[in-house]
Image (cartoon, grey):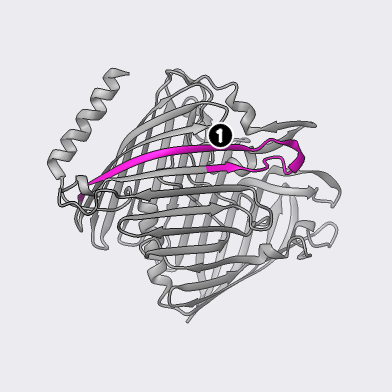
Amino acid sequence: MKGKLWILSGSVIALSILMAAMAWSQVVDLSDLAKEKGLEEAKKQAFGLTTGLGFTTIDGVLHYRVRAVPELRIAKFSAGINVDLLWNSKTGAIRPADKYDGKRFGRIIDHLGYGGSKDLVEAKVGAIQDYTLGHGFLMNHYSNQTDENYRKPGLYGRLGFPIAGGQFMTSNLGRFEIYALRGFVRPLSKMSLPIVKNLEAGLSFLGDIDPDQNRSSGDAISAWGFDAGVPIAKTEAFEADLYTDFGKINNHGAGGATGIAAKIQATNLFAVGAKLEERFLGKEFIPRYFDGFYEVERYRDSSGVPLRKAFLLATVDTAGKNGTFGELAGYVLDKVTLRGNYQHYSKLKYSGILHLTALAPKLVPKTDFTLAYDQKNVESTRDLFKTNENTLVTIEAGREVYPHFMLYLTYQRTFEYRENDLDGKPVRPGYYPIEKFSPRVDFKLNW
């Protein structure tokens, strides 16, 4: 452990001496930068409309598909809906999950939003994707939309004033479930000392009120954490931050992490970011407990046996088994955006977790390409690209075949929330792994 600490400390000190400068910001995050660039592009159009016709093969059953996604943008305000209907070719009926009755009508709201990641105030109601709390030690890449056809009306917001601020999130306004809250202060911001004056300290509270969707079961889980960070460099071309985190899952264990994040950017030509984090874990603790798989793992039914993610905590002996997390991200000429991260814990089998995303909407004229890939329980390179219950994958390629018309081919290995099977027969409610293949034609219009 001491050897790893010396190596990490030496790297941090060397980078600090080489590139230290004055700055204040939250920890470097290329995903925020990408979101902000997208927002700036969106501001140029007041209205956008995407409609689509096609078919989807779900577990070998053909479904016909109709989709409409209009969006309205006025200054920093935006609003959008998402209507997506699938007809079972065997029965001729709309899937039960797609019927817009009183219970499910709210899911057609894609979002109501204000502001962006660089504004003092940002808020959004609707689908929540890729949400990270603070540095992401307890909640990272969380999404309330594991199944695009089972959208929950979530809410998140952020306040970012120079001396203090915060962020908050709840996964479902219709039924209070998962929540996250972080407040931060910059207590030395009024001082004239370089670097030190930009120290930021935060306190987080988060949890899941009802993992099994049964209020009387008493299975709520909660956590809290403390974090601190200081930007050691900030110029137009370079940013670097040091940070440390502590997290505690109530009635279970605790852990900590120390890391450095940096980004190099050359106007709109390219940007490259990296993060390296060393983790020190105690017994019954899982960092990033609320992750991209959480909606699926929070509660599952296995042959009539209820399984909760919280059950794993009692079996996890991470005491003394330190881990390393690394992330690389970047974009080139606004044509390719990439991000990948990997984490693994020493002396703990099947602890590897891989996350990859790639977007190339302008690499080749009139084409679009998207890749998203997540894999858990990785032990060796053979496990990295298996397709099983630990896999989430989306691969989509599109080509403009006529002005405003795009032909897409999409493959997904994901999870779908079901209360009925494909034939409409009742099943135990929950997320079930599925495979989809979907050719479709989209009509896109902006003005």
Q: Secondary structure at mark 1?
A: loop
Number of disc labels: 1
Coordinates of residue 146 in the picture (x, y in percent): 61, 49
Left or right placement of residue 330 versus residue 420 in this view: left
Residue under label 1, please give it. 386
Residue located 40% across and 23% down the image = 322
* 283 w.r.t. 34: above or below: above
Determine the residue located farthest toward the bottom in the rendered image: 447
The range drawn in magenta is 206-233
Examine the structure image and report whether residue 74 is included in the region drawn in magenta: no
Residue located 50% across and 21% down the image = 283
Which quadrant of the view contains residue 333? Answer: bottom left
Type of the residue with mark 1: Lys
> Is 167 in front, or is 332?
167
> Is 163 in front, or is 158?
163
Coordinates of residue 399 in the picture (x, y in percent): 50, 65
Coordinates of residue 411 in the picture (x, y in percent): 59, 51
